[in-house]
Amino acid sequence: MHYSIVRNSLTSQFIQIQLEISCQEMETICLQLPSWRPGRYELANYAQKIRAFEVRANASEIAWKKTGKDLWEFTATGSGQYFINYEFYCNQMDAGGCWSDDQQLYLNFSNFIFEVLQRKNEEISISIELPSDYKVATALKKTGINKWESESFQHLMDSPLLASAELKHFSYSVKGSTFHIWIQGEIHFQIENLIAVFHSFSEKQIEDFGEFPADDYHFIIQLLPYTHYHGVEHAYSSVITFGPAHALSEKSELDELIGVCSHELYHFWNVCRIRPKGILPYDLSKEVYLEEGLVMEGVTTYMGDYYLLKSGYLKLEEYLQFLQKQIQREFDSFGWQNQSIVESSFDLWLDGYKGGIPEKKVSIYNRGALLSLCMDLMLRKSGSSLAKVMKAMWEKFGNTQIGYGLVDFEKLVVSHTKEKESMTDFLRDFVWGKNDLLPFLKSLLTTINIELLENFENNDLLHFFGIRKEESGIITQLHPNTEAYNILMKNDRILDHDTINTSGNQVHLKIERFGRTFPITLPKCQKMYFPKFILQAKGDHRSSLRGLIGE
């Protein structure tokens, strides 16, 4: 089958697509459009961006029908070539969407190509009408001018493409594999330094997994003029959208870009190949419920940052700042009291990528990274590491492509430690359970001479009354163990800061709630809430560094 893509109007953001397929007489063709895409476990319903769908053969329209929100069917009236024509709206600029304008064409084929259910493994060729000065970044095999081919639907939907006259290309090699860096947008950093850092973390990841079974790999990076942060993994490439581009002149911002790139490269093994049974292969037509979020994103988040430390890009103090932010984010929330990380993983399809209701869930990325840190430090006591566990995962489940379950991962973790009972208890209490991780994490960090301190700034409302608010006075969070939780509401507004008197044992507030204005008096708590966490190495910092990287 063959896809042809043109753009009749660049600024309309519509692309015109034609799928040509050979059919037998009376053959029924089922065209399944993805409802979601790999790397984001929520329904996207891409069918809402399709218009002008038709089927033609011999210059005549062929009857078709929809049997689902994203499933089209038609029956061939005779043998020959059939043409499915439709338009797709490319207006989503992030690492998983599509974008078309007068400067570029950026496509994630998972958004708009059909899985022909009767021909899942058939080769697919693609031709795209592009200006002659456009350069193209993609992992697809090139077969001619603006022509490519893929082995199957699964291959094509996992191979994004970016085309632009302004696209810049750089590369480096590690152990016989070539890594391509494609950048669209303004560059406000030393590209030579970036390449050196990419080379370093790529080399360390490959060393720990033992192999990198790809001749080429592509980092496709969109540097945007506005604030943005997103990355998506693919079999032989990753897309990163980041902005604002000019901020990358600051090392702290460049750290973020490099961090997400290290994270996405780690996905080459973990998720793209070490994959839960439920998504091997991907069925993009419906939800696939997964318990393995800890492994898929938690381990990847932790290891992505870990390799920046191990490669020498991050100094110990800089890495501790990364970790400190994760700890702050985790313990500013109380979702862990209501849902385990396994439950939050299963519920990704409900609210995994939005705020959701207060204190309902945990982040498989953030909490998952802290759980991974704990497992790594516990494994190191036995002379092993999480990196060694993941290499075993690669050899047993990734390289063999047989898929795994969360229990399989846990069995490997336990098998790599001498303190099997302690690790089993940890998995029960903090992975499947809802225990408070903070005391355990504090204790574990002291074993490598890292101290986790709690500081209380000059913010009485926050620390003595458990009220977190914006500068405008809007209340954004209330600590569930305070009196304020039972009297105030999220989104109440504290009208006048001058009316606040915290010198005694109470505070007087003037509150606006849905047009009503009224006073409230709250007692000052003896306990303090919402600490600011500080992470610091004690004594000889080299021992802390050895404890973290195992060297």
Image: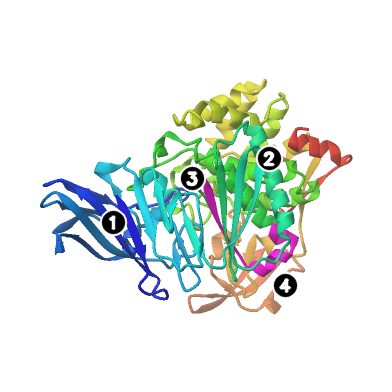
Return the residue at label 2. 203
Q: Residue furthest right?
A: 539
Point out residue 36 in the picture as x, y percentages from the top left corner: 39, 52
Task: Give the quarter of the figure containing the C terminus.
Answer: top right
Cα separation, mark 2 vs mark 1, equals 41 Å
- Of badges 4 and 2, the one in the foreground is 2
Residue type at mark 3 is Ser
Which numbered disc flags the more N-terminal residue, 1 or 4? 1
| CA neighbours of label 1 inside 10 A, class few (<14), some (14 to 19), many (20+) | many
Cα separation, mark 4 vs mark 2, equals 58 Å
The foreground one among 232 and 180 is 180
In the picture, measured across the screen, residue 153 lies left or right of residue 437, that is: left
Considering only vertical position in the picture, is 15 above or below 383?
below
Cα separation, mark 2 vs mark 3, equals 33 Å
Cα separation, mark 1 vs mark 4, equals 70 Å
Which numbered disc flags the more N-terminal residue, 2 or 1? 1
| CA neighbours of label 2 inside 10 A, class few (<14), some (14 to 19), many (20+) | some
Q: Which mark is residue 501?
A: 4
Considering only vertical position in the picture, is 113 above or below 441?
below
Q: Which mark is residue 134?
A: none
What residue is shown at x 53% (from left), y 65% (from top)? 489
What residue is shown at x 61% (from left), y 78% (from top)? 495
Which numbered disc flags the more N-terminal residue, 4 or 2? 2
Instruction: Say what secondary structure mark 3 lies in.
Output: helix
Span shown in magenta: 234-254
- Of badges 2 and 1, the one in the foreground is 1
Point out residue 287 in the picture as x, y percentages from the top left corner: 36, 46
Q: Which mark is residue 344?
A: 3
Q: Are marks 1 and 4 in contact (CB under 8 Å)?
A: no
Return the residue at label 1. 19
